[in-house]
Image (cartoon, helix red, strand yellow):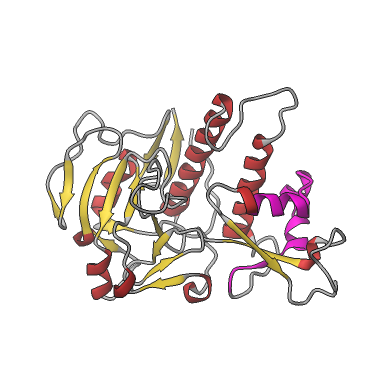
């Protein structure tokens, strides 16, 4: 049976977002059961990290994708009034408070959100215990499908400050569509998301990777950012270190010509692309494999559950 995909935008892109979010949800639940990174082992009350993950996901969904439909206007930098955000039904049902959001901003391992004082606040000292949600603005640092001006939200990357490595993580199930498209597309979001290293890296030789690649990505695409910049592709860096691009001006594509190397992340599948040229196909035994019990129909843009 096909899972429903939210209307609006490219159906394949929305389906891919839905699959990625579902994958991440399953990974978070698994970590929570095991007491691993980003989650805590289940305990008596069923609270703690489990609720934090739920609040983070709900807040991300609103600020990245649904603010306009919820009647919440984002400013030019992607900020929204926190009091209106917390009044949104799904967050209100979770009874999210200013203190919850302050804690989330301070402790979220991927630094997904930013919080700042509302310049229109009438509170003479909003840093005190008497502060309210109306005194603050909140935003998601990246990942939007809501159209925003990148230059007001992100820091541009130039030829003078290209990161040493820029990697995009993806899944075996998506690889045939990436090759068929001739490269990477934002797929429902405003940008293709990349990292400056593997999320399992400990930071040796540079800062630890906070965000930009899912921890269960199966393929790693190393990208020639310098070469693409020279051909007019714009690149950006978010507050939490994610490297982003809209692709080219003709359809938002980051061409396979800029694929330095494509390899398996955990599984050895050989070198699939190198220096912009195809070297091999995925091994036949894993071609088209979905994640878990889910597969992706590229022609219909639908998620199917076996």
Residue 232: image location, x then y, percent:
28, 76
State how many labels appear: 0
Q: Start and end of the magenta stretch? A: 77-105
- Between 208 and 56, the one lying in front of the other is 208
104 or 80: nearer the eye? 104
Q: Can you give x and y, in whole percent of width and height, for residue 180 in the image?
A: 24, 52
Residue 7 is situated, as x and y percent measured from the top left of the image, at 54, 54
Q: Residue at x 32, y 57 (%)?
A: 166
> Would residue 248 appear left or right of 275 to someone viewing this image?
right
**Which one is nearer the viewer's eye here, 71 or 32?**
32
Q: Residue at x 13, y 43 (%)?
A: 280
Q: Choose between 250 and 242: the one closer to the eye.
A: 242
Is residue 186 found left or right of 87 in the rendered image?
Answer: left
Across and down, in percent, residue 229 comes to 28, 72
Position above or below: 82 against 17: below
Is residue 118 shown above or below 9? Answer: below
Find residue 228 and report its image quarter: bottom left
Furthest residue in direction top, as rendered: 44
Residue 212 falls inside the magenta stretch: no
Q: Residue furthest front?
A: 205
- Seen in the picture, residue 175 relative to 195 is either above or below; the reply is above
In screen coordinates, is 221 left or right of 31?
left
Instruction: Name the residue: 73% across, 49% down.
Output: 100
Residue 72 at least partly seen = no
| Quadrant in which the C terminus is drawn | top left
Q: Is residue 78 magenta?
A: yes
Vertical placement of residue 46 versus 275, above or below? above
Which residue is drawn at the image coordinates 79% and 61% (left, top)? Answer: 133
- The answer to whether residue 73 is seen in the rendering is yes
Most common SS among magenta residues: helix
């Amino acid at each position: 049976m096909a899972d429903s995909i939210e209307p609006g935008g490219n159906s394949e892109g929305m389906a891919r977002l839905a699959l990625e979010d579902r994958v991440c949800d399953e990974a978070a639940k698994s970590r929570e059961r095991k007491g691993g990174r980003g989650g805590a082992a289940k305990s008596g009350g069923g609270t703690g990290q489990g609720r934090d993950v739920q609040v983070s996901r709900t807040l991300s969904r609103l600020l990245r994708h649904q603010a306009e439909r919820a009647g919440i206007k984002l400013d030019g930098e992607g900020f929204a009034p926190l009091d209106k955000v917390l009044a949104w039904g799904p967050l209100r049902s979770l009874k999210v408070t200013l203190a919850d959001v302050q804690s989330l901003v301070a402790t979220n391992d991927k630094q997904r959100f930013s919080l700042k004082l509302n310049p229109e606040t009438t509170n003479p000292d909003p840093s005190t215990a008497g502060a309210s949600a109306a005194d603050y603005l909140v935003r998601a640092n990246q990942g939007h499908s809501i159209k925003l001006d990148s230059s007001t939200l992100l820091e541009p990357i130039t030829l003078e400050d290209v990161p040493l490595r820029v990697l995009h993580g993806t899944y075996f199930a998506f690889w045939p569509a990436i090759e068929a498209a001739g490269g990477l597309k934002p797929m429902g979001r405003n940008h293709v998301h990349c990292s400056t290293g593997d999320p399992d890296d400990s930071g040796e030789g540079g800062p630890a990777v906070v965000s930009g690649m899912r921890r269960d990505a199966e393929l790693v695409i190393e990208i020639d950012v310098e070469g693409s910049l020279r051909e007019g592709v714009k690149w950006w860096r978010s507050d939490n270190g994610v490297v982003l691009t809209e692709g080219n001006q003709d359809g938002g594509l980051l061409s396979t010509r800029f694929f330095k190397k494509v390899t398996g992340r955990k599984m050895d599948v050989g070198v699939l692309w190198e220096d912009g040229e195809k070297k091999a196909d995925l091994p036949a035994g894993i071609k088209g494999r979905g994640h878990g019990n889910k597969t992706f129909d590229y022609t219909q843009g639908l998620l199917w559950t076996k």
